[in-house]
Amino acid sequence: MQQYRLSELAEKVGGTLKGNADIFVESIAPLERATSQHLTFISNPKFRPLLAESQAGALLVSEADLPHCSDKQNLIVVKDPYVAYAILAQYMDKTPKPATEIAESAVISVTALLGKNVSIGANAVIEDGVVLGDDVCIGAGCFIGKNAKIGARTKLWANVSVYHEVEIGTDCLIQSSAVIGSDGFGYANERGKWIKIPQTGTVIIGNHVEIGACTCIDRGALDATVIEDNVIIDNLCQIAHNVHIGTGTAVAGGVIMAGSLHVGRYCLIGGASVINGHMEICDGVTITGMGMVMRPITEPGVYSSGIPLQPNKEWRKTAALTLGINDMNKRLKELEKQIKNISE
């Protein structure tokens, strides 16, 4: 197993070493079960009482954590231990690549352009006009449609489908069974008969974007669906046609975004939220889990909706009161009118 010298790890995160710089660790482990072969970290102050008793070979800590550590421990002192953990977790990552070579069973068009060190897994299909940048990695069973473009160092895990004309930037990561560029939900209705509207737009995905397993991003009806740089989208999300998601936004699992929605930059969308289409959410908005967003949001801040879980007996009372709100409102207005008349 590969080992990492503590001085090497400290240099990677720009940390200050306290203790033995020449010890080696093999991997990162949680604080409560780390042993002498492990590096560990603390990101929540409530765990400080555990620091002095940790058996880890080395700890990532902040200056504020130092009074809770033992003089005998090996420490890397950083500004933000959680960020340092993320950087070192990437550096020490042993996750295998989706593919390591071009498999014999891969079907690759003679008109496709492949960059240097491209890997393509078994039974993948690369259609006419596709462009794959340097070090692109395509997992087993993927489908890359005509004239699609995928930027350098992007990785697709098994069974991802990228439809025709889609553009994906550099350093992206797309998890298994995601579908990029499928038809948007566009139909006209003529006396009860649905008439399909061909979706002739595309999907444009920026750089350093991550897309979770089984997430679907529909192509635009006429223009493009756009996912800007540094966006992260969790598993099982539905991004409808012509949605535009701004730089740095994070979308948790199970979110549904309706068509032509514009989400600003650096927003946080909580899991299982449902967001109406043809409107805008400004920059810097946080929507907590299971939010139902039916109107535009024009001011940054934290927004919530929905009723938290209650015992069924209490919930039935809450539901009954909610259903009576309209009648209560009418009675309140009548009382206000009577009070006003008396005061006059």
Image (cartoon, grey):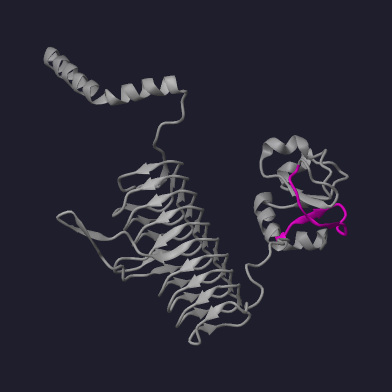
26 magenta-colored: yes
Quadrant housing the N terminus: bottom right
Q: Tell me which residue sits at (46%, 61%) in the image.
A: 247
Q: Where residue 267 sits: x, y (%)?
A: 45, 52
The reply to whether residue 60 is visible in this rendering is no
Query: Quadrant of residue 90 in the image?
Result: bottom right
Query: Quadrant of residue 344 in the image?
Result: top left
Q: Where residue 58 sits: x, y (%)?
A: 81, 50
**Residue segment shown in magenta:** 13-31
Position of 20 with respect to 184 (left or right) is right
Position of 309 with respect to 58 (left or right) is left
Residue at the extreme top: 342
Q: Tell me which residue sits at (36%, 58%) in the image.
A: 240
The reply to whether residue 66 is visible in this rendering is yes
Q: In the figure, 322 relative to 86: above or below? A: above
Q: In the figure, 303 relative to 195: above or below? A: above
134 magenta-colored: no
Q: Nearer the viewer, residue 280 or 318?
A: 318
Q: Tell me which residue sits at (48%, 52%) in the image.
A: 236
Q: In the figure, 5 relative to 305: above or below? A: below
Q: Tell me which residue sits at (67%, 59%) in the image.
A: 87
Q: Nearer the viewer, residue 80 or 258?
A: 258
Q: Nearer the viewer, residue 227 or 113?
A: 113
Position of 187 with respect to 21 (left or right) is left
Q: Where residue 199 sits: x, y (%)?
A: 31, 67
Total marks placed: 0
Q: In the figure, 10 relative to 323: above or below? A: below
Residue at the extreme bottom: 110
Q: Nearer the viewer, residue 50 or 320?
A: 320
